[in-house]
Image: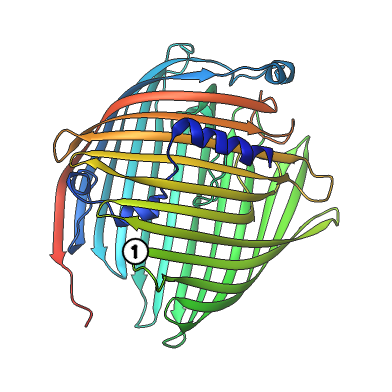
Amino acid sequence: MNACRAAVRVCAVIGLCALSSDAWAQRETGPFGNLFGSQPGGDVNQSLSLRWSAYGGRDDVLRDRAQDLAAIDDRYRTSGDYGGLSGQVAYTRGAADNRFSLFGSTNARAYGAQHDIPMPTFSTGTAFNTAAGKRTLLRGTLSASFAPYLQLAPYITADSETGPFSFGSAVATGRSLAWGGDFGVTHHLSARTTLTMDGGWQRGQFARAAASENRTARGRVTQNLAAGFGVHAGYGYQDARFPFGGTPAVTTLHNLDLGVDFSRALSFSRHTRLSFGTGSSIAGTTLGSSQYFMTGQATLEQGIGRTWAASAAYNRSSHYTQGFRDLLFLDAFTAGLGGQIAPRVQLSNTVSCSFGTVGLGATAPSIGSYTGSTRLAIALSRRVALSASYTYYHYDTPLGASTLPGISGQLNRQAFMIGLNGLIPFINDVRPRRDSR
């Protein structure tokens, strides 16, 4: 609860609350729709684009007495200036139930306080979905990434389950690798009943730390009872291996996915949408301990005028996150507000907090974090924007809970960044959207 009270103070400093990415995406119009590749009124049949950014900024560690006492060998406690270039090439072909996409990105960043990071980051991935008959859809993703430095921002938000590594966060020298994939199938048993099955595997390797991996398999049956309302029943299995000290520690997670799903505009306002869902899980270890955990999420979105939207979200979840050596049980909150303050000026802000435990049992150590950010973007043309952002985050995690080397239990950090962002569409084949009626 201390983390949430601190998040309120962050909100007061920033002055505005967060806009969820889904809410803003639904209302992104004007020059920013063209700038970031939105194509209202049609379906993209084939596209090839390059997104680029040139930026500079500064990270500052905000020290206090508690942090000084906790810091023994924390490589992330380095303030300094940085600058860099980034680019992402993305290709997409197909629409609706048959689509293939491929992307590759790189980011070269130089730090004034750390001169021994000469290599850029790289990431690549592919995704597909394809119809296998009239009622069956197949889908899958593969991805891999490499970074010459470790990024640290161990906060979890309500609209994104995990976010341990983030752009503009604290860094320390040391290479990191991550790769994985997932595949699934969706089959419509009837007009109202859907069967979904999927599985996946992820692995992470950090410098001077043992690799961790987790596997997932799950199935779910969803029954729609009315427009925007249904029930579901399913089962999911996950296991994670944390090989520390020569002994692989295995944690298993059994998701008894029983609950309801609701998502519709409220009757008193077509600009207000509420969605929520419920579930449950049972986690256990090879040593025999177990814990029951209720899960769920809820989101409230409110459109304001033509280009503004507000949102609030809550997420209660249990899952694995790279960078931690055990299962996380978390409650997370996010609130938001954002939109266009002028025809060519966009403002978006974020504030969120999370708290929970690392591992099982009543004596499991607690973890808490909160973050706030604000971003202003000015469209210089249909394809180029000037942006400035400020981010502040705090985390408080037990010593020894992370797989990353040299981390103490607390960190307060702020980051300033300014840059140019652009989009170059090499191929943009859009076909008119069909009327489903």
Q: Nearer the viewer, residue 410 or 19?
A: 19
The answer, for residue 166, to whether it is visible in the render is no
The residue shown at (44%, 76%) is 228
Q: Nearer the viewer, residue 319 or 147?
A: 319
Task: Specify whether 86 is left or right of 2.
Answer: left
Q: Quadrant of the N terminus?
A: top right
Amino acid type at circle 1 is His
Residue that badge 1 annotates: 271
Task: Specify whether 297 is left or right of 355.
Answer: left
Secondary element under disc 1, as helix, strand or loop, is loop
Task: Specify whether 416 is left or right of 89.
Answer: right
Q: Quadrant of the C terminus?
A: bottom left
The residue shown at (45%, 39%) is 145
Task: Specify whether 268 is left or right of 423.
Answer: right
Spot occupied by residue 181 in the image (x, y as percentages of width and height): 49, 54
80 versus 288 height, above or below: above
The residue shown at (77%, 40%) is 365
